[in-house]
Amino acid sequence: MRKIHLTLTLAAFVVLLPGLCASAGETFRPKHTIAKLETGVEPVRVVAFGDSITGVYYHTGSRRAWCDMLGIALQKAYPKAKIQMFNAGISGHTSSQGLARIQRDVIDRKPHLVVVMFGMNDCARGDIDTFRKNTEEIVKRLRGAGAEVMLCTPNNVYPNNPRPQARLAKYAQITREVAAKMSVPLVDSYQAYEDVQKKNNTDWCLLMSETIHPNMNGHKLFAEKITEAISGKPISLDDVGPPDDALAHTIKLLRAGKPVKILAMEPYDKIMPDVLREKFPSAKIEAVTWPVTGKSLEDIEVWAKDVRGLKANMIVFAIPESMAQKTQTKESEETFVRKYTWALALCFGYGPSTGDVVPVLPSVTKPVDDPGKSWEALAKRIIRGYDVEFIQRPAGNTKNARQIVTDWVDKHLAAHGK
């Protein structure tokens, strides 16, 4: 199997908008790129160009984003292809800042295809006319360098003051208009998010990390749609799990004899350090308790704001059953998703991963009669949005929490050569 070479930093999202036709029945597609993907004779270089919604940040677990998912999806659609993915987005950037670095970050990579997604930050501190001119200039510059281009609208967002939805919708419309004017393939991520939200608001919440940034659930969706826009056929990423590197940072430190700081919710503030001390008797392990007893989900969310400042090497995130069970109505379910999601998001460093985050499902702490209960299933879907492996109770398993954690740690020690 050929390897996909992935260079990370940012990401964008896309859904092909029907109806933009060069002639009746014909839709704009990156035909030269498609030909190269189909033959597999030479590497196909794809650059994702945008802002933090494109990038590898805490929103998706700090290790991968849609750029990686697109590479995987394209490989599924084109098994012969040799694909090189390059992420060229920077947090906070507007289209003006993108133009200023387009030569260095994009054109110098000699891309065959560039997926462009700006607008979220232009909406917050720019003006529409400048955004239109910049978007047109980006297309001209890239085409002048011999690359094919796909334009993406930004995703929709939770209500917020810096980026009001009505204003953001106007920026999405500008992107559509430029795509039509310049005969560029359009991927309408804004409309894709709108469609999900209209159908089921909880499902939409599960695409989002916080107010404006999608999580890995959202990034997978967009990678699927981008691939469909390119290939003309649906591709599913449901079978793509998180990277196989759970505990990698912690194990490396322990094997090197270096101190390890663990921040863990009760009762894992005692369970996880004790299990690791059994495996590494001479280890220097500092355990810090993240209190949950008698706390509300709101308390957990507030406490999470201080997590990054503690600089832990491992964080064990284990929302207890008592909080999870409160998701009985649609309104409370959506509130639970948002608060749980945001608290978990703050466990990740802002940029690339420098530690291990280990979520634990509620049923590990306390077995449930029905592991398919709505709150347990919701927790799984939220955690999958951060691209990390979680500890769960296997079906029919009657072991206590410590035994389950021990088995999980043993599995990863074996995977890392012990």
Image (spheres, rainbow, N blue to C red):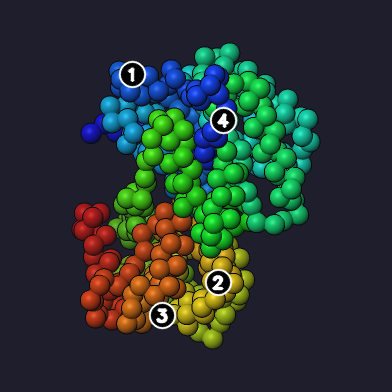
Q: Nearer the viewer, mark 3 or mark 1?
A: 1
Amino acid carrying label 4: it is Gly
**Pointer 3: what residue?**
267
**Pointer 2: what residue?**
330
**Secondary element at tag 2:** helix
Q: Which mark is residue 19?
A: 4
Q: Are marks 3 and 2 in contact (CB under 8 Å)?
A: no
The answer to whether residue 78 is seen in the rendering is yes
**Residue 54, percent from left and from top:** 54, 40
Which residue does the image show at 51% across and 78% down from the upper left? 328
**Residue 251, percent from left and from top:** 32, 58
Q: CA distance from mark 4 to mark 3?
A: 55 Å
Mark 2 vs mark 1: which is more N-terminal? 1
Which residue does the image show at 46% across and 56% down from the upper left? 385
Report whether 54 appears left or right of 418.
right
Which residue does the image show at 34% across and 81% down from the upper left? 368
Q: CA distance from mark 3 to mark 2?
A: 29 Å
Report whether 101 appears left or right of 81.
right
Q: Which mark is residue 54?
A: none
Q: Which mark is residue 42?
A: 1
